[in-house]
Structure formats: structure tokens, C-alpha cells
Image (cartoon, rainbow, N blue to C red):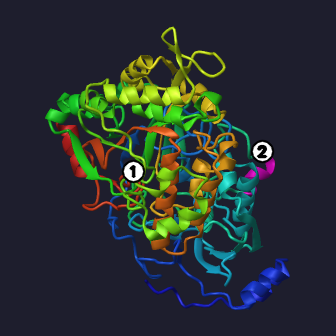
Amino acid sequence: MVPFSRRRVLGLGAGLLGAGISGALRQAFAAGAGNDIHGLSVFGDLKYPADFAHFEYVNPDAPKGGVFSLIPSVRAYNQSYQTFNSFNAYILKGEGAQGMDMTFAPLMVRAGDEPDAMYGLVAKSVQISPDKLIYRFTLRPEAKFHDGSRLTAQDAAFSLTTLKTKGHPLILQQLRDMLKAEAADEATLVVTFAKKRARDVPLYVAALPIFSKAYYATRPFDESTLDIPLGSGPYRVGKFEVNRFVEFDRVKEWWGRDLPVARGAYNFDVVRYEFYRDRDVAFEGFTAKNYLFREEFTSRVWATRYDFPAIKEGRVKREVLPDETPSGAQGWFINTRRDKFKDARVREALIQAFDFEWTNKTIMYGAYARTVSPFQNSDMMASGSPSPAELKLLEPFRGQVPEEVFGPPFVPPVSDGSGQDRSLLRKAQQLLGAAGLPVKDGKRVLSNGEIFRIEFLVDEPSLEPHHAPYIKNLATLGIEASLRLVDPVQYRARVEDFDFDMTIERFSMSATPGDGMRPFFTSQAAKTKGSYNLAGIADPVIDALIEKILAADNRADLTVACRAFDRVFRAGRYWVPQWYANTHKLAYWDVFAHSAKLPRYAQGVGAPDIWWWDGVKAATAEQAK
């Protein structure tokens, strides 16, 4: 483990007393607080020493300039892939603009080559009380908002308190173990956590944006708005047109540009997001050079449509990079809040009816492997019979979970690839019959006498080919299934209200799962509007195992707890698993450059944060026109 800084903080008690911080807090530090440290990680291990110059995976001499344009490929909170109408991306209302995180500076930023380590940006250092419930962040005096005003601990305390009370429901849930945030003085932020707090909550807190307290003194925080908020990050909002594009301009005299965590990053003068309602139209926009970078998620397009002139002439480059992070879960999530999906046998019948092998071969050019676990592509995924350590966690729940939990985990069936595997459809028929859903006049009937109908909810037409054969197989079972295509705003509203039968979602777990699991799997999240628990999972055993995951104090115990959780989750048949790929398929106009080895844990492939504009390539491309 890299040694921490040994510099001690003097006069701590007096400083806290003068600021009115509680006596209990003062005593906690006076009783033997640890030294200031320059970074945080879940288990305390840090790769980089206090005096590191820059992250190893960046080009510290990367030139500044150029434009990086793309379409959204990730989203958080109230963001959409297809549109935006607000610059408030941290509440439930509105459709938040992609890229707003670039306009705010957090306390710390993640290292892309470590599973969860963070190093100081606004925070110069942090001191942790012996019981690990109080974190004292020392802020850099040079940190400033874009209007030149100083960023203080009062701003940070205001931001955390506001997000805890008025932020997006997912933020509220992940901050539930943060009791309070207080400013001891302009440079000292003190955050107090609850006993038995989730292991990674301090890291989540350190990554949240810091807003200007003065800016929001005359404005409501929890309103959707196109007013550009006052930021402190490496970019500020530039030109935009609602629902079409938004640009972010680099702050050339940004206060943090020479810090180790920022050196070699934030290189483009402009980062521009383009929004399209349709994937096929978005692809045509790329071929016309309406934007410059594209990560391809549609295997059919990757296999058949990258033959346009710019590809053949070498002006557009294709690159396949490994994805070594947990691939997560993608599938049709079944809304168990609805009575017709309450029985796990019904849900398993829906799994049996999906012919992945045919879909992969015929529609997706054999480009994918089957997803079976939310921890896909990681050692946290369960396999085989439980180990003794897993059994120790699972035994207390014997009788509360299906007996299969104590054997090999559930794996979706492998079909014969015909599109209508008779043996699998026969098993689905048997499961539906055993669940008390008979066939009458060729229609599957629910216990209340109604015909069994399923509506698949989607927000883009490119998914229609994947639904058609599945709907056909469900019809063979007597189930009336249909596809409902709605616009992105209506889609998000319905999903947030859990107003759907089945819908596709993909999410990935961190390399160090922690409190972020609660919004996806807990009973509390099942009844929280806007949560990611689309299936409505409300199982006390799953809740208890998540607490075991959060309580793990080393990576080996964490892996065991995740595998135990995985077995119980998969036994619940909450989703129809789809597919995943362990690579990133990239296409970009050949005006960019990146390091030879990109960081394993960086979001996506580190673009645009650590890529840069290649002036020579750009000039050559211009001459080639």
C-alpha cells in the first residue's frame, strides 16, 4: 500500500470550537484523529503517493484545443440519451443536459486505473476520525467559481445538504447515511456519517458536485431550468439549442488545471453533445460528420454499415478496445408490482420463451454473449455450488429462499437456435400451467379471468427487431404481447412511475459494489419513484445480503458476499437476461489521439476526458477534402 502523508493538522480543536462545531465532534478528533491523507479508497489502498505528478494513463503534455463531439452513451439521474430541456441534472424534474458534471468541481476525482480510489481536487486532503464516522476535508484556497469568487466549505456544506434534501431520489437514497455536512471555517468541511454507514458513502459524497451557495440564495434549487448555473469545473456551458445540442467551453484559466488529478485531462476547447431521437438517424449524422466520435452499441450497424466512403478512405478510424470492467445487467425487467408477474414460475416461463441463440445469430451477427448475472464479466459472479464462505452467509436464510440457492446458480437456457425451441416452449407451458394460468380458446388466462397481456415499453425503434421474435414465441404460449414505442420524455415519466409491464434496461455495478446497489435492488427502492429498481424487488433476504456487501471490510469478503447475493437475485427470476460484449466498439473521425493503454476503470474509454486533438491529423484531413 502506498504510504499516506504524515503531515499532521495543528490547532484543530480551536478551529472547530471557533466555528461552533459540536463538542462531540471536537472530542472525536482530539481523541486521536488520523493524519491528513491525500486520497480515499474503500479499503484504504492507494496506488499514487501524495506527491504524484499525474495519473500514469494520461499524456501530461497533451495539447489543448479542438472539438470533441459525440452523442450520449451514458446517463445518470434525470438525463436522457435523446433529448434535454434543463441544466439542472441533479433533480427528478426535467431532462438534464448531458455533460453538466464537467461544469462542477467535486471534492475528489476517481483514478481510472484503480477500482475505487479518489484523489483531491477541491479538497487538498481529508482527515478521518478513529471511528470513521467523521471526515474533515481541507479545501484548497485557490478553488474558485467561474465568476472568480472563492469556493468555500460553506458552499460544499450547502451543496451536500441541499442534495440530501432536494436532490434526485437516487441521490437522497445514497446520502441517507450522511447525517450532516458543516463548515468549520472557509477551508474546512466536516461531514458526519451514521453508525454502520455504507462502506462507500464517503466516496460518493466526495464525488458530488459543489454548487455556489450565493447563486442559489435567490433561486430555487429543485426547479427545472435553462438558466446556466454557476460552476467551478474545467468547462462551462456554451452554445446550445434545446433538444438538439449543447456545447461546453473549456475554462482556459481554470484554477485546477495544474493539479495532479487534472494534468493531461480536459484537453478539448469544446465538448459538444448532439441529440437524436432515432439511432439510425444518429448513425447517418455520424457519416455526415455532424459529430466526430461514436461508440457503437448495435452489432447490426457495426457489421453492415461501416462501409461508407470516409471509412474506405481512412478518414474515419474504427477501434475495438477491451472492456475489463463488470459488464453488468441488460435485459427485459419484469415489473413484479403487477399481480400477473408475482409468481416466479410465470417469470421463468418468460425467460424460457426468449431464444437468445437465434436472436444473436440472426439479428446481432453473433456479436454477443449471454448475460446471466448483474456481476457479469467479473469474479463477483456466482458459479458452481456455493463455497463454504458463501454457505455461511446463505444458511441463515434457508427456508426463506428457493432451495436452488444452495446449488449451482440459475442460468438461462440454451436453445437449439431455431427461433422456436419446442422443448423450451414446452417447459414454459408447464410453468404457466403450474402457476394456475390455463389456456382458454387459445388465450392464456390469468386467475382473475382476464387474458394475459404484456406490453413492452421502449423509446427507440431500433429495438423493434429484437422484440418481434420474442413476441411471436409468447403468442405460441397464448400470451398477447405488444410493443409500445413512446417518445423519450413519456418513456422516462412512465419508467419513473413504474408504469410498464416489461422494459429494457442496462446497468453496471462498480468494481467495488457498495451503497450504489440500494437503488437497484432494495425494498426501499422498490417503492421510491425514480429508482432503478424497475423489477420492484422487495425481498428481505436481498436487503440483508446487500448489508453484508456493505459491511465487508476487505475485497475477499466483498467477493463472497456478492456471489451469495447473486445466487438469491438470480433465483428470483426478476428479468429476462439479454446480452453483453466485453469490448468497446469505437468509430471516430481521425482527428483524435489517446494514450496507448487506456485506464481499465475509467468510464467508457476515457473519452473525452483524457483524449486530445491531433492537429497534424486534423490538418491532413482538411487537405484531403
Residue 327 - label: 1
Q: The magenta stretch spans which residues?
A: 213-219
How packed mark 1 is, by other alpha carbons closer than 10 Å (few <14, some 14-19, many 20 or more), is: many
- For the point 57% across and 52% down, which residue is it? 401
Whether residue 212 sits left or right of residue 377 in the image: it is right
Residue 127 pos. (x, y %):
63, 81
To which residue does mark 2 refer?
220
Sequence-earlier tag: 1 or 2: 2
Residue reaching furthest to the top: 441
Q: Amino acid at mark 1?
A: Ser
Q: Amino acid at mark 2?
A: Pro
Residue 613 pos. (x, y %):
31, 51
> Can I make out residue 206 in this image?
no
Which of the 4 image quadrants contains residue 369? top left
Number of marks drawn: 2
The answer to whether residue 271 is magenta is: no
